[in-house]
Image: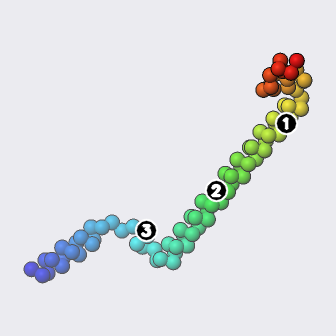
Amino acid sequence: MKKRKQTKSQAKKEDKPVTLGDRLNNDLMSQLKAKQKELKEQEEKKQQEQKEIAAKKRREEQKRREKNMSFEELLAQSDMDWEKFK
């Protein structure tokens, strides 16, 4: 009977699928995780830089448009009620 229990427990262990993490040693696994984290940080930094560049371009475009506006266009965009100051 004891032999049957041991074989069942061994069979349960064998039923569990073998993962890549099980096959690699811990040092290699930690190196891979560190590299993954580093790559993720680099990608986030790159995305942040792209957002900053896009924001800078929008500001420059807005300044260029304002620079080329006539007085009438600037007056039309103003939030002030000019009739109060007559």
Residue 20: mark: 3
**Amino acid type assigned to the residue bearing label 3 in the image:** Leu
Within 10 angstroms of label 2, few (less than 14), some, or many (20 or more) residues?
few
Do the CB atoms of the residues marked 3 and 1 lie less than 8 Å apart?
Answer: no
Horizontal side of residue 14 vs 8, given as left or right: right
**Amino acid type assigned to the residue bearing label 1 in the image:** Lys
Residue 31 vs 66, above or below: the answer is below
Q: Nearer the viewer, mark 3 or mark 1?
A: 1
Within 10 angstroms of label 3, few (less than 14), some, or many (20 or more) residues?
few
Mark 3 or mark 1, which has the lower sequence index?
Answer: 3
Residue 63: mark: 1
Horizontal side of residue 68 vs 51, given as left or right: right
**Amino acid type assigned to the residue bearing label 2 in the image:** Glu
Label 1: which secondary element: helix
Instruction: Report which residue position mark 2 lands on.
Output: 43
Question: Which quadrant is the C terminus positioned in?
Answer: top right
Q: Residue at x 74, y 43 (%)?
A: 54
Residue 73 visible in the picture: no
Tell me how far mark 2 sits from mark 1, CA to CA: 31 Å
Tell me how far mark 3 sits from mark 1, CA to CA: 55 Å
Label 2: which secondary element: helix
Mark 2 or mark 1, which has the lower sequence index?
Answer: 2
